């Protein structure tokens, strides 16, 4: 499994058309995430946690510096390649759900990777059950509750078996049972040598999971404790 290393990463959002100045989020961020561990990232609103998650998963790219995945510079990797290693559940998961039916959402990535449709649908149906979504099979994805959307996004990523799962504030919208279900999947991934980065404001979560804490400060300094 692959370590992920941010090396002197600088990133700014470009100035907007509505005269908002460009926003420097990271200025030389250096941070290494080792596989086989859970990391819990916390920090004040707007300090860059979601930006970190988007950079790690390749949706955003650094202005300078490198993000290494298992020793390879991700600058040379396309999104599908990065997706083999890192799966991101976004802070607003409805944005990443593209299919109408939950089962098709889970099957989509498998079919895209070359699995036969019938086999993919069978895996997808099993994943729906596994993530407690069997009753929602006929509900349009955009009509699911946020907690259900989180689990659907996570199931769609998990069937592709990435090395890393990144959950951007995904736990706060889950009830006790589904939170337990999601954390059990995270623990299983880590037992198998993968890694997880969970963005969460909860101070207790890191203790609960025996996780490494990353405290992100404004100005993009990540302190690992
Ligand atoms: N698409 C964007 N365009 C311009 N600026 C952005 C964009 N997204 C985020 N920002 C700005 O970049 C900074 C970091 O934002 P980010 O969403 O990464 O913070 P965060 O730590 O995830 O915050 P929160 O706890 O509220 O989720 C903030 O100042 C934010 O306003
Ligand atoms: Mg955020």
Image (tube, rainbow, N blue to C red):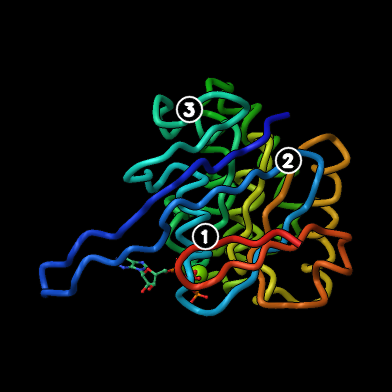
Q: Residue drawn at (63%, 34%), measured in percent from left and top?
A: 160
Question: Is label 1's Cβ within 8 Å of ligand 2?
Answer: no
Q: Tag 1's secondary structure?
A: loop
- Per the image, the residue denoted by label 3 is 73
Q: Please say if the residues under marks 1 and 3 sit with CB atoms less than 8 Å apart.
A: no
Q: Tag 2's secondary structure?
A: loop
Q: Residue drawn at (31%, 58%), measured in percent from left and top?
A: 12
- Per the image, the residue denoted by label 2 is 34
Report the label total.
3
* Residue toward you, 165 or 71: 71
Q: Earlier in the sequence, mark 2 or mark 3?
A: 2
Alpha-carbon span between mark 2 and mark 3: 16 Å
- Per the image, the residue denoted by label 1 is 90
Give the crowd class for mark 2: few <14, some 14-19, many >=20 residues within 10 Å: some
Q: Residue drawn at (67%, 54%), measured in percent from left and top?
A: 197
Q: Tag 3's secondary structure?
A: strand
Alpha-carbon span between mark 2 and mark 1: 21 Å
- Viewed as shown, does residue 68 lie left or right of 25? right
* Residue toward you, 117 or 12: 12
Q: Residue drawn at (54%, 62%), measured in percent from left and top?
A: 221
Q: Which mark is residue 65?
A: none
* Quadrant placement of the N terminus: top right
Q: Position of residue 110 (x, y in %)?
A: 57, 31
Give the crowd class for mark 3: few <14, some 14-19, many >=20 residues within 10 Å: some
* Residue toward you, 25 or 148: 25
* Quadrant placement of the C terminus: bottom right
Q: Position of residue 57 (x, y in %)?
A: 50, 44
Alpha-carbon span between mark 1 and mark 3: 23 Å
Q: Earlier in the sequence, mark 1 or mark 3?
A: 3
Vertical arrangement, residue 173 with respect to residue 91, above or below = below
Quarter holding residue 131: bottom right
């Amino acid at each position: 499994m692959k370590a992920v290393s941010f090396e002197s990463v600088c990133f700014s959002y470009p100035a907007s058309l509505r005269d908002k100045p460009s926003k420097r989020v990271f200025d030389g961020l250096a941070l290494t995430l080792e596989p086989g561990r859970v990391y819990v990232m916390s920090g004040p609103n707007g300090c860059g946690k979601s930006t970190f998650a988007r950079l790690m998963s390749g949706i955003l790219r650094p202005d300078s510096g490198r993000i290494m995945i298992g020793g390879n510079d991700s600058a040379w990797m396309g999104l599908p390649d990065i997706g083999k290693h890192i799966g991101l559940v976004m802070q607003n998961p409805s944005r990443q759900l593209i299919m109408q039916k939950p089962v098709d959402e889970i099957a989509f990535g498998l079919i895209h990777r070359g699995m036969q449709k019938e086999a993919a649908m069978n895996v997808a149906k099993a994943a729906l059950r596994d993530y407690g979504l069997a009753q929602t099979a006929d509900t349009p994805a955009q009509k699911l509750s946020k907690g259900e959307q989180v689990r659907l996004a996570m199931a769609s990523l998990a069937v592709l078996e990435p090395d890393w799962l990144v959950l951007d504030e995904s736990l706060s919208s889950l009830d006790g049972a589904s939170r337990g279900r999601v954390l059990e999947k995270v623990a299983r991934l880590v037992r198998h040598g993968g890694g997880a980065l969970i963005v969460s404001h909860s101070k207790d979560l890191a203790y609960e999971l025996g996780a490494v804490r990353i405290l992100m400060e404004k100005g993009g300094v990540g302190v690992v404790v």
